Amino acid sequence: MMALVSAHYTGRLAPSPTGLLHLGHAATFWSAFTRARDAQGTLLLRNEDLDPQRSRAEFVDAMLEDLAWLGIAWQPPMLSQSERLPFYRAAFEQLLRAGHIYPCTCSRKDLARMMHAPHDEDDEPLYDGRCRPMQPSSLIAANYRFRVPDGEMIRFDDGNLGPQDFTAGVDFGDFLVWRKPVPGDPQEGGLPSYQLACVVDDGAMGITEVVRGADLLKSTARQMLLQRALGLPGVAYFHTALLRDENGVRLAKRHDALALRTLREQGVAPEEVRARFG
């Protein structure tokens, strides 16, 4: 499987409003901005606010302020995932009709880790297939997984890291695409996983290149399978190296000292921040 890209460049920023942006976000978003700018293309903004427990309006305001302070311009309007649930549901039902997904009865604790973008140190665990034999005759209230084609090699040429390949069923297993309703969900029908929402939105937004961290390389392989199953065009990929702290730990939203808001309050200039990652 090879990613495709059209002549007009369209990229995107896709922050989640679950905390303050930090230097790691800044490095990736600056790469996305400069690649769109250098290609004389378009850069869009997607607010990935599907987590009803952790998404907060003040973090949306903060990320908009931080992006402007950093010097990143994007073309409005901003797309918010919480307003697009019917589109994710339609994609889910398409996958169900085609037999690509099946209900999963595994524990909520296991599934909770799979609802958000994975990271290198906590990537979605290889699923053992215990629920694979389940074949629903109609839509039921359950969690659903995508049935990967065991043994298929998923290949793509990353714009930064070069040729990549992952084997379905070995490097990653059947992955979550839909979570059944839990208290606090915005509607009774449940929520899509990061993988499904990302693919649906990239297609709807006409994204031609996805710029994101190297912790999401396996997610790219998963999403390429979803693109094919949904009949969506492929995209190009550019995975950036991860920024880490002095102990070698990947920067996360818990690193408040390296949050862009904190650096701004300390009087650090945006030019100084950009100079850290070129």
Image: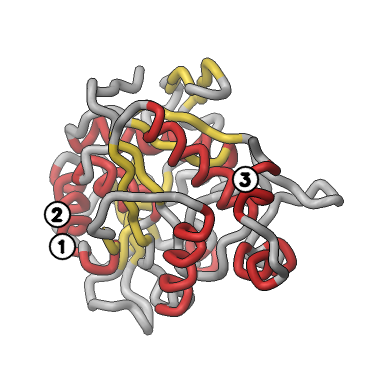
Work out how far the residue at label 2 is from the one at label 3, CA to CA, in angstroms: 40 Å
- Of tags 2 and 3, the one toward the viewer is 3
Q: Nearer the viewer, residue 131 or 146?
A: 146
Give the x, y percent position of residue 188: 23, 77
**Disc sitting over residue 90 in the figure:** 2
Residue type at mark 2?
Answer: Ala
Q: Residue at x 22, y 56 (%)?
A: 88
Residue shown at the point (18%, 49%) measured from the top left: 91
Q: Which residue is mark 1?
A: 86
Going by the numbered disc 3, the residue's amino acid type is Arg
Whichever of callouts 2 and 3 sits on the residue coming sooner in the sequence is: 2
Q: Residues within 10 Å of mark 1 (few under 14, many from 20)?
A: few
Q: Is residue 67 above or below residue 212?
A: below
Please identify the residue farthest to the right as the structure is shown.
247
Q: Which residue is mark 3?
A: 274
Scheme of image coloration: secondary structure
In the displayed orientation, state which residue is furthest to the bottom: 183
Relative vertical location of residue 198 with respect to residue 3 in this rendering, above or below: below
Q: Residues within 10 Å of mark 3 (few under 14, many from 20)?
A: some
Front disc: 1 or 3: 3
Q: Residue 156: x and y, percent?
A: 43, 20
| Lateral position of residue 152 relative to residue 96, left or right | right
Kindly identify the residue that appears in the image at 45 percent across and 39 percent down.
Answer: 32
Q: Are marks 2 and 1 in contact (CB under 8 Å)?
A: yes
Q: Secondary structure at mark 1?
A: helix
Does the image show residue 133?
A: no
Q: Is residue 147 left or right of residue 128?
A: left
**Amino acid type shown at disc 1:** Pro
Please state the horizontal and vertical placement of residue 138, each as a whole percent of the image: 14, 57
